[in-house]
Amino acid sequence: MARNGCRFVVHRGRRLITRGEQREALDTAFAIRTSEDVARELGNMKGALMKFGQLLSFIMEALPPEAQQALASLQADAPPMAPEAADAVVRAELGAPPQKVFLDWQVTPIAAASVGQVHRAVTRDGRDVAVKVQYPGVGDAIETDLANTEGLYRLVGAFALKGLDTKGLVDELRDRMREELDYRLEAANQREFAQHFAGHPFVRIPSVDTSTSTSKVLTTEWVDGIGFGEFMEHATPAAKQRAGESIWRFAQHAVHRMRAFNGDPHPGNYRFTLDGDVTFLDFGLVKRWSPGEWERLQPSLDAIVVHRDPQQLLGAMELAGFLKPGHDLDAEAVYEYVSTPYTPFLADTFAFDRDFVKRAMATVIDVKGPHEHVIEQLNMPASFVILDRVVWGVNAILGKLEVEAPWRSMLLEYVHDAPPATAMGRAERRWSLEQQVAPE
């Protein structure tokens, strides 16, 4: 922060004596250099702050492409731990070094992210697997990160978000990230999702190898495929359409039908084929609705996207804890602000693009803009924190993929069991009916 703060002061000084296109070039160079610095530092820090950097890497469309590319390294290519450290974790968890546990072990990880890094290996019975090894000490790092985050929320709340329940929000994040540190829980999550989506027409989830999985080592079926960057570069528009709808439908199905959903929808957690098929990875951060939790939230979302009724929204938000009773807010002003990320559901069809994500994010974070009076009174109930992350994460991915679809009709499939609106919806409906009649 100190280094980039000084850099910002110097940048502003140079900007004062620069004009026209040269000023724009200065701004771009500043954004790129700062993003590279942030990516490097957050990559080395791991934990919650790196996870925050991952989120920034694909939703901050206002950054120049080169700056986004620098931050994108946090999705799977962060600096790894030393080979000796990974060996020590495997030895402690499985009783022997990885070269003894597995028939083949690749010392160099294929991916390194916020909580652990992934090595490719072959089991003793000849199966190709991916082995995720947790960073030593990452639990302590996350606790420290979240303690600092609570102080930051209080600071922000004192100036802009006066209605924010910082304690509830941080407690929710802390609970979810503590769960993410237990790979036994992640293995159970992944097995549950894999079983639920078995035979699904467009959702694939790798199986878990229980015999070589512990609280800090997770071994799963190896999946061939390409990363998001390569997919974006080489896939056809039709393949991007299929991939985007798959990711969106996977999230909606989990939220509405499983009542448990993956709260970490960043591009590093998917593997693609050039045909647009998607394999879903990483089930460490899973949010489960407790009894009555979704029932308190759903009326607010229904008021926005199903009924499109500002007055109904105001009452629902008060009951859910988004607003305190006795506020002086205008229903139309509230609706205009909170419906921003749900714009795709307010028309018969909508074409996502990166500019939409950029505009929506600018509206939501403009605490001194036209919605200032609304923002300062809004709260984010703890139960909505992870779902909100999913909304923005999926929106950002669809914006990059430039997917067009009848999103509102598709949403009604999950909310009110409406008829399928697309070919993929019809395929999923057939699968659901087959699941219902399948023998126990």
Image (cartoon, rainbow, N blue to C red):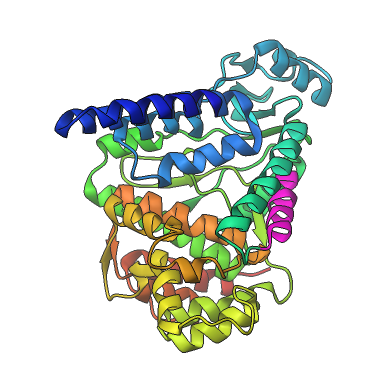
On screen, residue 98 above or below 406: above
Image quarter (top left, top right, bottom left or bottom right) of the N terminus: top right
- Does the magenta segment cover residue 34? no
Q: Position of residue 133 (x, y in %)?
A: 68, 27
Nearer to us in this view, 438 or 80: 80
- Quarter of the rendering containing residue 165: bottom right
Tally the numbered discs: 0
Q: Residue at x 47, y 82 (%)?
A: 303
Q: Position of residue 257 (x, y in %)?
A: 58, 70
Residue 427 seen in the figure: no
Nearer to us in this view, 19 or 383: 19
- Quarter of the rendering containing residue 48: top right
Residue found at the very far top of the displayed protein:
84
Q: Position of residue 228 (x, y in %)?
A: 39, 38
Q: Position of residue 135 (x, y in %)?
A: 70, 26
Q: Residue at x 29, y 65 (%)?
A: 405
- Does the magenta segment cover residue 170? yes
356 sits left or right of 210 in the view: left
Image quarter (top left, top right, bottom left or bottom right) of the C terminus: bottom right
Residue 90 seen in the figure: yes
Chain part drawn in magenta: 165-180
On screen, residue 104 above or below 350: above
Magenta stretch prevailing secondary structure: helix
On screen, residue 362 above or below 107: below
